[in-house]
Image: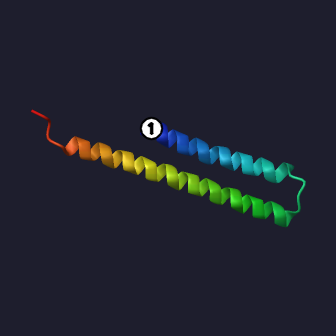
Amino acid sequence: MRKIIDFVVGLLFGGLVGATLGLLLAPRSGLETRQLFRERINEIVEEAKQAAAEQRLELEARLAAAKRPPAA
């Protein structure tokens, strides 16, 4: 579980750093840059939601397996 949390935090941090550098270094107009920034933030949010959903499914499966009585 800790690995997944670390992954999501790294993903969000990397996205934030990349977006910030893109804003600072891009030779685009402010309007175009803001549009690209919004799109990238939306992508990061969707990736985080997907990772969280996958993690939830895995944890639910583990919980169900733990609740099953041991085979005799």
At 27% from the left edge and 45% from the top edge, which residue is drawn? Answer: 63
- Spot the residue most to the front: 72
- Spot the residue most to the bottom: 31
At 14% from the left edge and 36% from the top edge, which residue is drawn? Answer: 70
Q: Mark 1 — residue?
A: 2
Name above or below for residue 47 compared with residue 35: above
Name above or below for residue 44 compared with residue 2: below
Is 46 placed left or right of 16 in the picture?
Answer: left
- Spot the residue most to the top: 72
Q: What percent of the width, then of the height, locates residue 56? A: 39, 50
Report which quarter residue 46 is drawn in.
bottom right
**How many numbered discs?**
1
At 88% from the left edge and 58% from the top edge, which residue is drawn? Answer: 28
Q: Which quarter of the image is occupied by the C terminus?
A: top left
Q: What percent of the width, then of the height, locates residue 19? A: 73, 51
Q: What percent of the width, then of the height, locates residue 64? A: 25, 47
**What colour scheme was applied to this rendering of the protein?**
rainbow
Name above or below for residue 49 compared with residue 11: below
Local packing at callout 1 (Cα closer than 10 Å; few below 14, some 14-19, many 20+) is few
* Amino acid under disc 1: Arg
Q: Which quarter of the image is occupied by the N terminus?
A: top left
67, 15: nearer the viewer:
67
Is 12 placed left or right of 6 in the picture?
Answer: right
Name above or below for residue 4 compared with residue 72: below
At 78% from the left edge and 47% from the top edge, which residue is drawn? Answer: 21
Element carrying mark 1: helix
Q: What percent of the width, then of the height, locates residue 22? A: 79, 50
Is 21 placed left or right of 67 in the picture?
Answer: right
